[in-house]
Image (tube, rainbow, N blue to C red):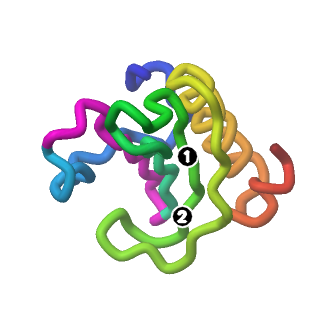
Amino acid sequence: MSQDDLPEGWHESTVDQNAAERYDPRPPILYEADDEVCVQVVPAGANGPHGDEDRWRVALLEGTSLSPERVEAATEVEGRDDAMALARDLMAAYNEQGSVEDARHAI
């Protein structure tokens, strides 16, 4: 997702979320809002012959990327494109609702 596709006030984080799993070609992606709220998109399955390589978890986090305060329940979706669409929807819902809890309920 390009910066132009993100809702206002959001940007892709420069924090390396894949430090522990350098050999997984499916890097996690983290988007941050200006007010210390994040949307995280991470692979859900194992990277291997028996893992589901196209399942992703999308979660809304309060706090910064390095010290999240609270994680709302992650949603698993099939396919990276659907995960990115859900991430964008969560960002837009947060902008509209103003709270993590209300954003989750709006989606």
At 23% from the left and 38% from the top, the residue drawn is: 24
- In this view, the residue in front, 77 or 90, is 77
Left-right relation of 63 to 103: left
Image location (x, y in percent) of residue 14: 22, 46
| Label 2 Cα neighbours within 10 Å, binned few <14 / some 14-19 / many ≥20 | many
Residue 61 to residue 94: above or below: below
Q: As rendered, which of 77 and 1 lies closer to the eye?
A: 77
- Name the residue tied to disc 2: 61
> Seen from this angle, which residue lies furthest bottom?
69
Left or right of 87 in this view: 19:
left
Name the amino acid type tagged 2. Leu
Image location (x, y in percent) of residue 74: 63, 56
Residue 99 falls in which quadrant of the image? bottom right
Looking at the image, residue 77 lies above or below residue 93: above
Which residue occupies the foreground of this view, 27 or 92? 27
Disc 1: which residue = 57
Could you say which quadrant of the image residue 43 lies in?
top left
**Crowdedness near tag 1: few (<14), some (14–19) or many (≥20) residues, C-alpha within 10 Å:** many
Residue closest to the far front: 50
Spatial separation of the CA atoms under disc 2 and disc 1: 12 Å
- Specify the segment rendered in magenta: 23-36
Q: Quadrant of the C terminus?
A: top right
What SS does tag 2 mark?
Answer: strand
Residue 8 sits inside the magenta stretch: no
Q: Amino acid at mark 1?
A: Arg
